[in-house]
Image (cartoon, grey):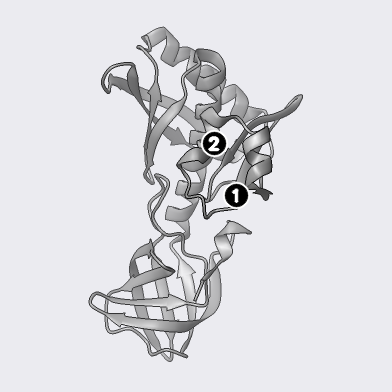
């Protein structure tokens, strides 16, 4: 059974109806035929929220993707066949969407301006960090990055996503950004997130996360610090305001 992941098509879905397909007891969790809850992955935390059915309510305390997407609950789960209504903690989800889009924008900027490819990232609802391959950023560099990021945000660049055949993606996309070679060979169709540029895309990368639809929704970017993460590795931290 494969759960229909609604967030892949529409990141704005915050309330949905679904059917319980599978129930497990330890810990209590359910698999649904469709879901708007994003499972933890790609540096983005899982969504939180509630499931409701027959006058009962369960808090969704964790979401993980294994053979399918499992929603961990705070009590005995509903039986298979139960129709449930899921509702996301939208403030938390929207924060993740803003930070994830900002991370894509920052990764593209650092690659363009400093030849510094991204090697990892972690997002939260109130901050984020990004690890890049680079010698060392100065305070002047950070100030320049912050200024350029806010220019890109104010440009109100469109953010969109679509699917692409893997072979075409390998031919056309920048391997430093997509790192397609790290994906299992079994994945033959990729979800591509694109940020518009003036003469073609400013950024295109394979990503299954959730994003806002316009860079202006990110808000003001503030670079909050840096630290060395090893040989030729820098970790940058940032926060969003607004």
Q: How would you rate the neighbour count of disc 1 (Cα within 10 Å): few for under 14, some for 14-19, many for 20 or more?
A: many
Name the residue beneath numbered marker 1: 190
Q: Is residue 20 above or below residue 72?
A: below
Position of 164 relative to 172 (above/below): below
The answer to whether 198 appears left or right of 80 in the picture is right
Which comes sooner in the sequence, label 2 or label 1?
2
In percent of the image, x 47 and y 77: which residue is there? 32
Contact (CB < 8 A) between labels 2 and 1? yes
* Residue of label 2: 178
Residue located 43% across and 26% down the image: 222
Q: Residues within 10 Å of mark 2 (few under 14, many from 20)?
A: some
Whether residue 159 is visible, yes or no, is no
Closer-to-camera residue (16/135): 135
Query: Please, what secondary structure does the residue beneath circle 1 have?
Result: strand
Residue name at image x 54 percent, y 38 percent:
218
- Numbered marks: total: 2
As drawn, which residue projects farthest toward the right? Answer: 199
Question: Is residue 58 something that shows in the picture?
Answer: yes
What's the mark number on residue 208?
none
Nearest the eye: 130 or 142:
130
Q: Position of residue 210 (x, y in %)?
A: 53, 51
């Amino acid at each position: 059974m494969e759960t229909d992941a609604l967030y892949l098509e529409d990141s704005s879905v915050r309330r949905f109806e679904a059917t319980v397909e599978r129930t497990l007891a330890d810990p209590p969790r359910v698999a649904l035929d469709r879901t708007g809850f994003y499972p933890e992955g790609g540096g983005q935390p899982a969504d939180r929220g509630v499931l409701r059915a027959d006058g009962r309510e369960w808090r969704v305390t964790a979401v993980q993707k294994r053979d399918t997407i499992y929603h961990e609950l705070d009590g005995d789960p509903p039986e298979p066949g139960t129709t449930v209504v899921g509702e996301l903690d939208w403030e938390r989800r929207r924060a993740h969407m803003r930070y994830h889009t900002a991370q894509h924008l920052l990764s593209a900027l650092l690659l363009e301006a400093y030849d510094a490819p991204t090697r990892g990232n972690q997002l939260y609802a109130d901050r984020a960090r990004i690890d890049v391959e680079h010698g060392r950023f100065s305070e002047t560099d950070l100030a320049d990055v912050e200024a350029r990021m806010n220019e890109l945000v104010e440009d109100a660049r469109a953010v969109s996503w679509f699917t692409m055949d893997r072979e075409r993606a390998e031919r056309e996309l920048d391997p430093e950004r997509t790192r397609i070679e790290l994906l299992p060979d079994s994945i033959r169709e990729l979800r591509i997130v694109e940020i518009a540029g003036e003469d073609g895309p400013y950024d295109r990368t394979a990503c299954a996360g959730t994003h806002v639809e316009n860079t202006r929704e990110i808000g003001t970017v503030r670079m909050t610090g840096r630290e060395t993460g090893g040989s030729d590795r820098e970790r940058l931290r940032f926060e969003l305001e607004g």
